[in-house]
Amino acid sequence: MLVLYETALGFCLFKLTDEGKLESENVYKDFESPEKASKLLKLKAIHRFTSTAMAVEEITALQEQKLTKSLKKFLSDEIIGKGKSKETLAVFDSQLGKKIKEKLDVKVVSPHMTELFHGIRSQLTALLDGLDPKDLATMSLGLSHSLSRFKLKFSPDKVDTMIVQAIALLDDLDKEINIYAMRVKEWYGWHFPEMAKIIVDNIAYAKVIKAMGFRTNAASTDFAAILPEDLEATLKAAAVISMGTDISDSDMAHINSLCDQVISISAYRTQLAEYLRNRMNAIAPNLTALVGDLVGARLISHAGSLLSLAKHPASTIQILGAEKALFRALKTKHDTPKYGLIYHASLIGQAPPKLKGKMARMVATKAALSIRVDALSDADDKSESQAPSIGLENRAKLEARLHSLEQQGDATTVRSAFAGKKQARFQMTGETKTYNTAADAVDLMPTQREPMEAAVKAVQDVKAEKKKAKEERKSKKRAEKEEIADGIDEARMDLDGEEETKESKKEKKRKRRESEAMDVDPEEPREETEEERKARKKAKKAEKAAATEDGDASKKKKKKKSEA
């Protein structure tokens, strides 16, 4: 049996002396020493690589399960040319064995010979006579580096992990700067509260504190490098009349330390933003030209990598970052969101509110194309001056499309404009017309009253009718009251069987006179005399007594009925 083994030196063909040992489970024991390995395997032929480039080409073809011309010629010369076609050839890769069998018509086996090939690798220097182990290690290392570089086409600018980390750090720095700056304003606000309204920028606020210190030093401090002249004058005037409290030197020292932190973190944040911009231009120039460096970096960070982002369709890129709103809309069966992280792109921001959804869809479509070009194009082409051409072309097309949509306006207006003939435009004329009395069909009769007099009479008649109706309602109410009072008196007479007393008759007459007097002139109230007040109280008492007597009489009648 012949064994084919590839090395950094070349292709080696070994002769296996005892095939029966391959069937044993302890094949590794035959490779414990160089002597045992030399007894089991004998080197028959070797095909050396003339250069590193040739070695890389041959090994790459083997990894792709291809049979190269040099390997085919070597095997045909050593096996078929020397009359060893009946020999069995053992190879490590089964796919390569199939190719050799098809091309050379040689019996090839590729059983599970992992231990055999491991043993050959461990004792390779002993099997190859006259080979220095250091030279073999050097050749293997050089071939490994060349093979990796050829296979991966590694480029330091292609590492998108740096973008993911940079954009995450940029967000963290923004939060830290905001927290520290607010703490500085709250802390220093006890000493100079008016300064927070004058200086809005956080970095300028911290720099002013570093330059000024206590507010009493504002008049002698030059803020020309930090603030404009108008703000400087306002700040100095406010420092004179400030209502803040005094602070100690130790307080001021700690405030200055916090200001140093704000200034240093802000400076590093600027450097990080510039680094992210350069990295985005190197990795995804087309995406950066279309949506900007920050939006592009957030899309890559959200997807995990540039290649993962390239696998997403345009519809997914459009709503990337709005997954929570999407699932909520699907659960509640409402409208799905129109945009996610891509909303912050400048092309969508400058679109009117009615066109933002349509613009987001178009930007996502062009962004998907740009991302795939950036991810799948050759790394060497991106360094050329025409690298972001697709992104710039798509951006120009989208800007032109947005301009045309803004010019068209609402779609309903456009459709109605071509629906039919337009109505003639109304034109104002300077002519004035007067009322033509000759066109009246009927004139006023000579005996007919004037229209104004008739209108006045009609109004007076309406008022008289209203007054008459009001008086009728009052008289009706008065009659109803009298009937109710008479009914009560009759009921009392029936129950008691007694005649009305003189006092009740007098009281009844007095009430009737009072009611008649009130109905005659209700608008003029009359003062109640002392006698009338006493008579009214007496009448109330008489009514209460009559009511109690009526109740007792009704109880007696019920009792008599029950006894009967």
Image (cartoon, rainbow, N blue to C red):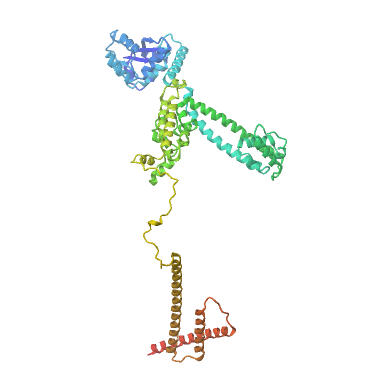
Q: Position of residue 204 (x, y in %)?
A: 63, 35
Of residues 42 and 363, the one nearer the viewer is 363
Give above or below for 270 relative to 526: above
* Residue 468 appearing in the image: yes
Give above or below for 384 relative to 530: above
Of residues 430 and 486, the one nearer the viewer is 430
Q: Position of residue 17 (x, y in %)?
A: 33, 13
Quadrant housing residue 557? bottom left
Q: Position of residue 234 (x, y in %)?
A: 67, 39
Q: In the shown orientation, is residue 119 left or right of residue 84?
A: right
Q: Quadrant of the N terminus?
A: top left
Of residues 272 and 290, the one nearer the viewer is 290
Numbered label tally:
0
Give above or below for 433 relative to 133: below
Quadrant housing residue 93? top left
Q: Residue at x 52, y 77 (%)?
A: 522
Q: Quadrant of the C terminus?
A: bottom left
* Residue 360 appearing in the image: no
Quadrant housing residue 25? top left
Q: In the shown orientation, is residue 424 left or right of residue 506?
A: left
Q: Residue at x 58, y 85 (%)?
A: 531
Q: Position of residue 214 (x, y in %)?
A: 70, 39
Of residues 120 and 73, the one nearer the viewer is 73
